[in-house]
Amino acid sequence: MPESTDQIILSELRDLRDEVNQFTRAAEGRLSTLEAGMYDLRGNGQPGRVSRLESRVHELDRWKYKLMGYSSGAAACISVAAWCVEYLLK
């Protein structure tokens, strides 16, 4: 006995609803994973990985300029010492 058109349409709609529900559950799972990752990166009331990384880069930048200053000072001292040795040997 062949199914009526109404039954076929109803069956197709039920299958479509099941597929949409499965897709929705999968999308919700992926969205919650993305939100957890976002809170890890941006922070959730605490500094996140991005802000900690920014502060470390800032510290490295300051360290670089300190090292450049110390190197310049050391080079000036060595130059003065070399000049004094040269002056004394003459």
Image: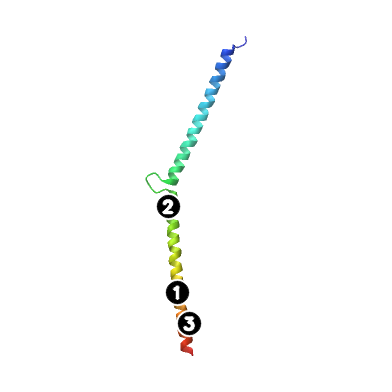
Element type where label 1 sits in the image: helix
Q: Earlier in the sequence, mark 2 or mark 1?
A: 2
Q: What element carries label 3?
A: helix
Kind of residue sitting beneath label 1: Ala
- Disc marking residue 82: 3
Q: In x, y percent, where is residue 16?
A: 55, 23
- Report the coloring of the rendering: rainbow
Dot 1 surroundings within 10 Å: few (below 14), some, or many (20 or more)? few
Q: Position of residue 5 (x, y in %)?
A: 59, 13
Which residue is identified by label 2? 52
Q: Which of marks 3 and 2 is nearer the N terminus?
A: 2
Q: Which residue is drawn at 44% across and 65% down?
A: 65
Q: Which residue lies furthest to the bottom in this view?
A: 90
Q: Is residue 19 left or right of residue 62?
A: right
Residue reaching furthest top? 1
Q: Which amino acid does label 3 sit on?
A: Ala
User: Which residue is under mark 1?
Assistant: 74
The residue positioned 46% from the left and 78% from the top of the image is 78
- SS at badge 2: helix
Place residue 70 in its image quadrant: bottom left
Give the left or right position of residue 18, taking residue 66 as reference: right
Q: As shown in the figure, which amino acid type bears the numbered disc 2? A: Arg
Neighbours of disc 3 within 10 Å: few (<14), some (14-19), many (20+):
few
Give me the disc on residue 88.
Answer: none
81 in relation to 65, above or below: below
Query: Callout 2: few (<14), some (14-19), or many (20+) C-alpha neighbours within 10 Å?
Result: some
Disc 3 to disc 1, how far (Cα)? 12 Å
Residue under the point 52% across and 29% down: 23
Q: Are marks 3 and 2 in contact (CB under 8 Å)?
A: no
**Position of residue 29 measured from the top left corner of the image (x, y, whole percent):** 48, 34
